[in-house]
Image: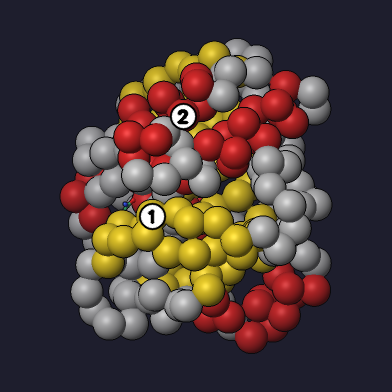
Amino acid sequence: MKAAVTVFPGSNCDRDIAVALRRAGAEVTMVWHKEDRLPDGIDLVAVPGGFSYGDYLRCGAIAAQSPIARAVSDHAVRGGYVLGVCNGFQVLTELKLLPGALLRNAGLKYICRTVTLRVESQDNLFARGYALGQRIEIPIAHHDGNYYADGATLDRLEGEGRVAFRYLGNPNGSQRDIAGILSENGRVLGMMPHPERAADPGHGGTDGAAFFDGMVTALAHA
Ligand SMILES: NC(=O)CC[C@H](N)C(=O)O
């Protein structure tokens, strides 16, 4: 399974996600933001967490205008798989590959701690490492993680089984406790929590390892 990880000035989880993907068996290529194409034959693009372009304007807004962002969009439009974690999720909403927006946390503070999530959908290749309804412990680290969409969009996401993960004990004010959502075709996942920061015993938790194992194995056979 071949994956690309985009790298922006200010990305800080690019190497972490590459390590987690490689550990799960993926062949990973890092792609600088000034590139305007992705490597041939990739199965997944991962847009990592961090502070792309210093979070200026809005988190993810400038990254969404970068040369590589157009290639990521084209990949998704062609039916390719895309994973956005934290700042990556923000970039994917700015690109309109996922609906809604990530607003400032309800408490206006940066939150860095481990939260409990419930796996809400297994009808996609991203969460194959988990059982439906499973509770997992995954770290968050963000100041703009408050998921917002209008009522009709939220109803649609729920009705179509596109809420991938929900917080148990909402840390940031996200509507309907949403921590991660899927695109209409189920091939684009955006999530605020960082599974790559809980993928090794040295991280203090390993619940994220099953995320990468399940996803890489599923994509290898897709
Ligand atoms: N860890 C991250 O990706 C943080 C995303 C963004 N910079 C925020 O604080 O909301």
Q: Nearer the viewer, residue 212 or 185?
A: 212
Q: Quadrant of the C terminus?
A: top right
Q: CA distance from mark 1 to mark 2?
A: 15 Å
Q: Quadrant of the N terminus?
A: top right
Identify the residue at horizontal 19%, vertical 50% (top origin): 54
Identify the residue at horizontal 62%, vertical 31% (top origin): 213
Hey, what amino acid is under mark 2? Ala
* Mark 1 surroundings: few (<14), some (14-19) or many (≥20) residues within 10 A: many
* Mark 2 surroundings: few (<14), some (14-19) or many (≥20) residues within 10 A: many
Q: Nearer the viewer, residue 12 or 42?
A: 12
Q: Is residue 182 left or right of residue 112?
A: right
Query: Is residue 95 something that shows in the picture?
Result: no
Query: Is residue 152 something that shows in the picture?
Result: yes
The spot of residue 20 in percent (x, y) is: 46, 29
Q: Secondary structure at mark 1?
A: strand
**Sequence order check, earlier mark of 1 and 2:** 2
Q: Secondary structure at mark 2?
A: helix
Q: Is residue 212 left or right of residue 107?
A: right
Quadrant containing ligand 1 reads: bottom left
Above or below 218: residue 208: below
The spot of residue 185 in percent (x, y) is: 77, 50
Identify the residue at horizontal 38%, vertical 54% (top origin): 139
Identify the residue at horizontal 29%, vertical 46% (top origin): 50
Write down the quadrant of residue 197 in the picture.
Answer: top left
Residue identified by numbered label 1: 139
Question: Do the CB atoms of the residues marked 1 and 2 lie less than 8 Å apart?
Answer: no
The spot of residue 6 in percent (x, y) is: 41, 31
Residue identified by numbered label 2: 20
